[in-house]
Amino acid sequence: MSEVTAIEHLIMSQRRWSPHATGQFTSLMHDLILSAKIISRNVNQAGLVDILGATGSVNVQGEQVQKLDTFANNTLVYRMQSSGAVCAVGSEEMAEPFFVPENEPHGHYAIFFDPLDGSSNIDVGVSIGTIFSIFRRPDDENYWQLSPEALMRPGTEQVAAGYFLYGSSTMLVYSTGHGVNGFTLDTGIGEFLLTHPNIQIPRIGKYYSTNHGYFNNWDPAIQKAVHSFNRPVDMPPRSLRYVGSLVADFHRTLLKGGVYLYPEDTKHPRGKLRLMYEASPMAFLAEQAGGKATDGKQRILDIVPSSIHMRTPLIIGSADDVDQVLEIYKAEGKE
Ligand code: AHG
Ligand code: MN
Ligand code: MN
């Protein structure tokens, strides 16, 4: 126990290595981690307290908002706003980003999050999570000129991204562009401890992950790509794993390798997942761990968002497995 590294210690020591650091990123991460600890506690108590079930309201995506979604969103918005480190906050649960008023403490960072990903799994005890994506406001951009459009930056400009997984244990997996580290919450001491240093995604995985129920709604190229995993010509088929929480499905893909696909289908012509707070942060992690992420045509990180809540098809995971999908798309004329 004496040799383990706690996240707060790591962030503080990294700060000492950057002479120009203002301490804002340290504050932001501190308040983000505190938010996640609070959300994690409530997720674990979901069966005990009256926080389950839908609120009855519908979010900007036209989906039912669960009570825990609202709680997680409120916790994160409050903590980020009061951290003094951010100037803007965007969330799946808010139609428009929130700008910290100019006369209140604010900082260089803009943060986007999916406060609770996989919320349809809350009531059935399956892993859910919080996804985040952090950008630095360009120094030459005047605070009062900030607009939602100014926040629509491609994923290549993220300065940090990651997720908290509320699963068999609570984990934080994140990157600041220097590899990916995973931390596990030790609930006894209330600290995230470094348990998965320098995560590397295997080049090829054992699993493929997709909602097979939509098979008949996919175009022939997607059907063929999926068949290349479950009916390959000269090798045993891959096992299918699909939880329905992106955080959980991506976490398994990151650690064990494989490919996750949420392509477009007749019901979701641009895919279902949101670029700015689902696909882009996961793509940042995948690439930092040696994997790939594409929408089938271009690298996810190169896409310039056309709206805060823009959707995108997502194919992400082991480099060779993602390439296999792209080769089939190409052969089928889908590029
Ligand atoms: P959210 O709970 O934040 O709305 O996200 C749900 C997303 C994602 O987590 C998951 O991968 C996907 O929806 C599952 O969709 P299907 O039920 O269509 O497979
Ligand atoms: Mn989500
Ligand atoms: Mn959500």
Image (tube, helix red, strand yellow):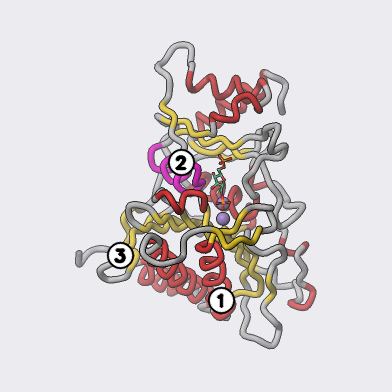
Mark 2: which secondary structure? loop
Looking at the image, which is closer to me, 95 or 59? 59
Which residue is disc 2 drawn over?
243
Residue 166 placement, left or right of 226: left
Which residue type does callout 2 highlight?
Val
Residue density around tag 3, few if under 14, some if 14–19, many if 20 or more, within 10 Å: some
What residue sits right under mark 1 in the picture? 78
Amino acid of disc 1: Tyr
Tell me where residue 284 appears, x and y as whole percent.
55, 50
Is the C-beta of the residue carrying label 2 under 8 Å from the nearest atom of ligand 1? yes
The magenta span reads 244-256
**What residue appears at the point 64 percent right and 61 percent down from the top-left corner?**
57
Q: Is residue 253 magenta?
A: yes
Q: Mark 3 points at which residue?
A: 5
| Residue at the left extreme of this rendering | 1
Give the main secondary structure, helix, strand or loop, of the magenta stretch: helix
Q: Can residue 334 be seen in this view?
A: yes
Residue 317 on image: x %, y %: 50, 38
